Amino acid sequence: MSAEDLAQGARLPGANSPRGSLAHPGQGARAAAPALLIVGHGTRDADGLAEFHALASLVREAAGSLPVETGFIELAEPLVDEAVDRLIARGPRDVVSVPLVLLAAGHLKNDGPASLERARVRHPGVTFRLGRDLGIDPAVLAVAEDRIRSVLPPDHDPATTGVVLVGRGSSDPDACGDLYKVARLLADGRGLGMVEPAFAGVAQPDVPAALERLRRLGATTVVVAPLLLFTGVLVGRLHATAAAWAEDHADLDVRAAPHLGPDRRLAKLVLERYREVLQGDVRMNCDLCTYRVRLPGYEDKVGLPISLTPHGDAPAGGRRRARRPTRAPRPAPAALAMPARERALHPSTPTAAADPAAPPAVALRRLSYAYPDGTAVLTNVDLTIASGERVAILGPNGAGKTTLALQLNGMLDGATGDVEIGGTRLGPSTRRDIRRRVGLVFQDPDDQLFLPTVRADVAFGPANLGLSGDALRARVDEALARVAIAELADRPPHLLSAGERRRAALAGVLAMEPDVLVLDEPSSSLDPAARRELADVLVSLSLTTLLVTHDLPYALELCPRAIVLDQGQVVADGPTREVLADEGFMRAHRLELPAGFNPLAA
Ligand SMILES: Nc1ncnc2c1ncn2[C@@H]1O[C@H](COP(=O)(O)OP(=O)(O)O)[C@@H](O)[C@H]1O
Ligand SMILES: [Mg+2]
């Protein structure tokens, strides 16, 4: 790998930083990659020092033509200041310093920046930047695991195996806390058994205390594993401590694991820390994110979209507790008292919030469905919608949105799992009632309107329920009024505009007085005015509403909450704005916002 390759993709030094004198001939103005200074703590132990240099050699090997120097904070030569001067003498005008330290504690936090500050004074015009410690990283975990496994009997039983993971020990609580995190991560999913942290000095618990704890927890095989990069007095002392404890506990099989030592994976990590500085890579704890990094026991999470739900960690489960409103709850507005847009932004408080004991308007539990030809469309869909909520169901073509809508009112037979509407489970005896309670407005109004007049169409459902005469007329008039098409009652549906047909179909559903309204792509084929009028109608209804849509701005305007379906699974469930603003997630699920549309500004 060349120095330039290494820095590839990195933000090269800006115009105001001095260009390196290392630019290769023929490479024009391309800046040389900054030089690398590896800083160790230093040790008086010759073997430990040799290991440090062996690891530094591995870094050099991997770094290709990049100039690399090594220096120490104390106890070994050259000290950092001298190493800096040597490096600058070789020509670089830009230096990245990476501490070859596992977990940063006081020394690094003070002496690292201090040495660079001194270097800046001695070498004005040279840029010095400090990288971070190796830290809690999958590479470190992998090397530690190998060292532990190298002494474990191959057939060990994790239930009776324990590891004492020994850190150097520090007065810095953050560094001590990091060891606990490493212990926890090593204990998780790797089959190593129980992992107890301990410190070689300064901090508690010490090694005998951790050994005793493991004994009491039932461990019969125990590994004492130093989480140290290089050998030295500490490693020897730890092994002696383990041996002494083993003498007093003959019933336990106590083994000493080697420390980490020089390893190519650690060398690569040093270069990763170097690269990170150049890329200004400010990350949270993404290094150990199960969604990005293959961690033992969590392999199936890699690449899954990250759930946006505020509760729980299931990326695709979407099981929620009662939702908190995403905005300050307001009393349910009297219909049409507030301008429609205002109402859209402040939906009425879900009634479930007022009565936590009330059953959810919609609850799906592990709902799976395949069409009779075997096409599996829904897989373990879990979702709960409180009464009064307006929720968008988003997803690319073929995600299963329409199929889900059809499931909600029992239009399709043969699903597994549960559909519950207002606490009533969908089944043969409740299907008829649930069809009435869940009003489904089809994507194509022509699938719904088939009688000669709008009035006849809207009356069809309630007449089937047994309504007649004045009661039927009143029901129809009310439904038409709610969608603001009273004047169209006697017109033939096929002569109406797309927007009017959509509202006529909605009136037919409202005439059944449903508890839940499900609309499949209601804005499709509507012009902007019709789309707006429909939005106003939907807001004025104050019904629990599921809006299946491709129209993302529409979803944002009407629905505080969005559920994203992809390949028949819930892949996100959260505030619509947050869902739409997650660009990577949206791209991953083939959801595209209109050009120039910014959900955060809308
Ligand atoms: N009647 C059917 N028989 C077999 N497969 C179907 C049927 N209807 C839809 N599908 C398939 O189910 C999947 C989901 O379809 P659908 O629910 O319409 O998705 P969406 O509404 O999200 O675009 C698609 O792959 C589609 O081809
Ligand atoms: Mg569809």
Image (cartoon, rainbow, N blue to C red):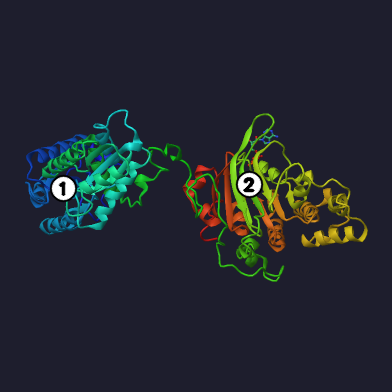
Task: Judge from the rendering whether residue 279 lies leftward or rightward of residue 86; answer left or right.
Answer: right
Asked if residue 311 is positioned above or below residue 53 in the image, the reply reads: below
Q: Quadrant of the C terminus?
A: bottom right
Q: Amino acid at mark 1?
A: Val
Residue 39, numbered label: 1
Residue 542 in percent (x, y) is at 69, 62
Instruction: Name the foreground residue: 79 vs 484.
Output: 79
Quarter of the image where one finds residue 172? bottom left
What SS does tag 1 mark? strand
- Which residue is pictured at 32% across the width and 44% down the height? 217
Residue 364, numbered label: 2
Q: Is the residue at mark 2 in contact range of ligand 1, meaning its CB lies under 8 Å from it?
A: no
Asked if the residues shown at circle 2 and circle 1 are in contact, with their CB atoms under 8 angstroms apart, the answer is no
Task: Judge from the rendering whether residue 59 lies leftward or rightward of residue 305; answer left or right.
Answer: left
Instruction: Name the foreground residue: 8 vs 73.
Output: 73
Residue 250 in percent (x, y) is at 21, 36
